[in-house]
């Protein structure tokens, strides 16, 4: 919200037909209000008097006094905006804009009143729009003969203020506000003036509209104008540049077409140059200016199509340099830069650039106590998670570069248990465990007891952190080489079986993804791991699996399929079959077979049951 104050050279006049400056009555009102909150009755009396005087077209002095009284009461008297809405004060002011002589002080005072009263409250702003303030202000702001006149400023300030309210936006757009502001902001003779800045501020307000109104703003051609003004050239207005960037941030945040348009028109390259660390030649921007440059770039990095193109412009290297610059440590600039890196890390091309020049930086921020539990640390850990989702060579490089140490250190800190800080660490562990080297390195560095600790932690129950921990355990148990037995034994020693059986049998998790992942861990632990089947049976695995097979809720589900596969794996060892039979497995499998006519029962499940039954029917 912006206030308007008349220029100093308009404070006096010798022309009685075009009076300027404060009247005696206005000075009296000001003194009364400054002495203490005036009575409501007194304010209402003065308002009514001001309205009556403002409508005396035959007496310029009286009309001016009336307008000034309304404006001063509205600006300074507590609760005056409610009284203004009860009277015809707004009508009087709006009418005076059109009825006063053009370029007169009376017209200027009416415009000033609209500008300043529009700072009061949302209900008053809505009343002003409903009573024609938009049309009145546009008639002054866009008139060719008003260009360069003082009157344009309060008219535009009023439009800025009125356009802030969501209820006003569609009404004002319908009156041609967008087209008018685009014409003013793009006019060559307005370049670098306050008028251009105010027009851009109106567009900025409209660009923050709900989707329906934002679509209207886009349809009028706002993006090309804003992009043109957002290019930072020598001698360009920093204020204009910042406002244009703010408009683009609002319009591009969820709009892929706008993101692509910004890139294709060459603005991204200009912004990458501006974002270079301090001390770079040519000189770059800083402060609020740099923050908005980075916000546009982070919006562009959201678009998967643009990530490799931004990497080709050298954005990743620029951001790493900015993150490491001493001037940016702990600032908003560093946060936005790390956030952008997290977005770029999801792309193979951009991820390669980060891996080459920025891995040490990301690891340092992710594990440093200087950034503990901060948004910067979170973004760094999300960048790591994005990199771990790349191919095998990238995951190997991350492990070699110490990234696993970073995520294990953070994830094991009780202070971040079940928080957004711990989440990307567990996601990274899932991804790193996809490769054999990753599984065994994680085993050596203590990942299994950490994952068990997370599965036990009460704050993690029923959260996606528990789900990811189970996924990581399932992946680690899915070894297919000679070290399988060693891995499974290690996991059993660390209590993995007890935890996954607990999840499988917990009624809270029946039919859920949590139960499915726990069953997958059991399947993998029981698959060709040497002589660990007896250990699994002793821990109650068979009873848990029989419970899944007998569940009416899980009839024909993927959960039952996993349970049958686990029983099949356990039945591979002839020495365990008698024990398995004695725990009700055949009856549970027969029960599933009895559902053959059910639409829920898949052919794969039928085949799996038949395989398990076949194994159990073989004599020892």
Image (spheres, helix red, strand yellow):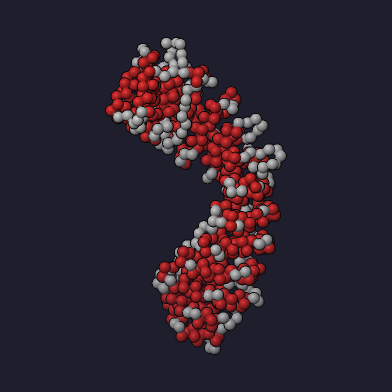
Q: Residue at x 58, y 72 (%)?
A: 477
| x and y, in percent, of residue 420 in the image | 52, 57
Which one is nearer the viewer's eye here, 399 or 344?
399
Query: Quadrant location of residue 129?
Result: top left
Residue most extreme to the right:
281
In the image: residue 283, left or right of residue 208: right
Callout count: 0
Q: Is residue 428 above or below residue 132?
A: below
Can see residue 519? yes
| x and y, in percent, of residue 206 in the image | 48, 35
Q: Residue at x 63, y 35 (%)?
A: 231
Can see residue 306? no
Query: Quadrant location of residue 255?
Result: top right
Which one is nearer the viewer's eye here, 239 or 156?
239
| x and y, in percent, of residue 327 in the image | 63, 45
Q: Is residue 327 above or below residue 172?
A: below
Residue most extreme to the left:
41
In the image: residue 36, left or right of residue 421: left
Which one is nearer the viewer's eye here, 382 or 84?
84
Q: Quadrant of the C terminus?
A: bottom right
Which one is nearer the viewer's eye here, 314 or 259?
314
| x and y, in percent, of residue 579 in the image | 49, 85
Q: Residue at x 44, y 23 (%)?
A: 111
Residue most extreme to the bottom:
620
Q: Residue at x 55, y 52 (%)?
A: 375
């Amino acid at each position: 919200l912006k206030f308007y104050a008349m220029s100093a050279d308009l404070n006096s006049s010798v022309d009685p037909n075009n009076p300027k400056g404060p009247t005696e009555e206005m000075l009296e009102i000001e003194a009364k209000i400054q002495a203490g909150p005036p009575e409501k009755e007194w304010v209402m009396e003065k308002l009514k008097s001001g309205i009556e005087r403002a409508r005396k077209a035959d007496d310029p002095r009286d009309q001016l006094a009336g307008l000034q009284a309304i404006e001063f009461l509205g600006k300074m008297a507590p609760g005056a905006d409610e009284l203004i809405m009860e009277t015809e004060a707004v009508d009087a002011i709006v009418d005076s804009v059109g009825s006063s002589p053009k370029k007169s002080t009376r017209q200027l005072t009416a415009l000033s009143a609209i500008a300043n009263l529009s700072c009061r409250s949302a209900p008053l702003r809505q009343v002003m729009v409903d009573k024609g303030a938009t049309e009145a202000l546009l008639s002054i702001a866009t008139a060719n003969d008003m260009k360069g006149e003082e009157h344009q400023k309060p008219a535009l300030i009023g439009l800025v203020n009125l356009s802030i309210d969501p209820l006003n936006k569609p009404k004002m757009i319908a009156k041609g506000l967008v087209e008018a502001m685009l014409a003013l902001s793009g006019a060559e003779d307005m370049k670098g003036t306050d008028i251009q800045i105010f027009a851009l501020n109106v567009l900025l307000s409209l660009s923050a509209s709900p989707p329906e109104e934002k679509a209207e703003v886009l349809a009028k051609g706002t993006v090309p104008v804003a992009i043109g003004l957002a290019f930072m050239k020598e001698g360009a207005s920093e204020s204009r540049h910042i406002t244009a960037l703010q408009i683009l941030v609002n319009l591009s945040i969820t709009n892929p077409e706008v993101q692509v348009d910004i890139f294709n028109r060459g603005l991204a390259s200009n912004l990458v140059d501006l974002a270079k660390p301090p001390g770079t030649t040519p000189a770059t921007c800083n402060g609020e200016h740099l923050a908005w440059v980075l916000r546009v770039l982070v919006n562009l990095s959201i678009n998967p199509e643009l990530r490799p193109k931004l990497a080709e412009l050298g954005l990743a290297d620029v951001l790493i340099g900015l993150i490491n610059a001493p001037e940016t440590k702990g600032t908003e600039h560093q946060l936005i830069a790390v956030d952008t890196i997290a977005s770029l890390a999801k792309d193979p091309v951009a991820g390669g650039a980060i891996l080459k020049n920025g891995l040490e930086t990301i690891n340092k921020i992710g594990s440093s106590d200087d950034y503990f539990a901060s948004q910067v640390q979170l973004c760094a850990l999300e960048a790591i998670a994005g990199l771990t989702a790349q191919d095998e060579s990238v995951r190997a490089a991350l492990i070699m570069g110490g990234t696993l140490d970073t995520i294990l250190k953070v994830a094991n800190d009780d202070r971040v248990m079940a928080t957004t800080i711990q989440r990307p660490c567990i996601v990274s562990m899932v991804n790193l465990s996809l490769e054999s080297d990753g599984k065994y390195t994680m085993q050596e560095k203590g990942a299994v007891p950490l994952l068990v600790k997370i599965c036990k932690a009460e704050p993690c129950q029923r959260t996606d952190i528990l789900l990811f921990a189970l996924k990581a355990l399932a992946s680690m148990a899915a070894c297919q080489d000679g070290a399988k037995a060693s891995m499974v034994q290690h996991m059993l020693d660390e209590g993995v079986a007890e935890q996954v059986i607990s999840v499988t049998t917990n009624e809270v998790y029946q039919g859920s993804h949590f139960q499915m992942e726990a069953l997958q861990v059991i399947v993998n632990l029981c698959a060709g791991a040497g002589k660990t089947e007896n250990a699994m049976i002793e821990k109650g695995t068979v009873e848990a699996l029989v419970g899944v097979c007998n569940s009416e809720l899980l009839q024909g589900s993927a959960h039952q399929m996993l349970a049958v596969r686990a029983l099949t794996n356990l039945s591979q060892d002839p020495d365990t079959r008698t024990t398995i039979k004695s725990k009700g497995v055949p009856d549970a499998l027969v029960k599933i077979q009895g559902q053959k006519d059910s639409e829920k029962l898949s052919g794969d499940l039928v085949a799996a049951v038949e395989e398990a039954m076949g194994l159990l029917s073989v004599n020892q």
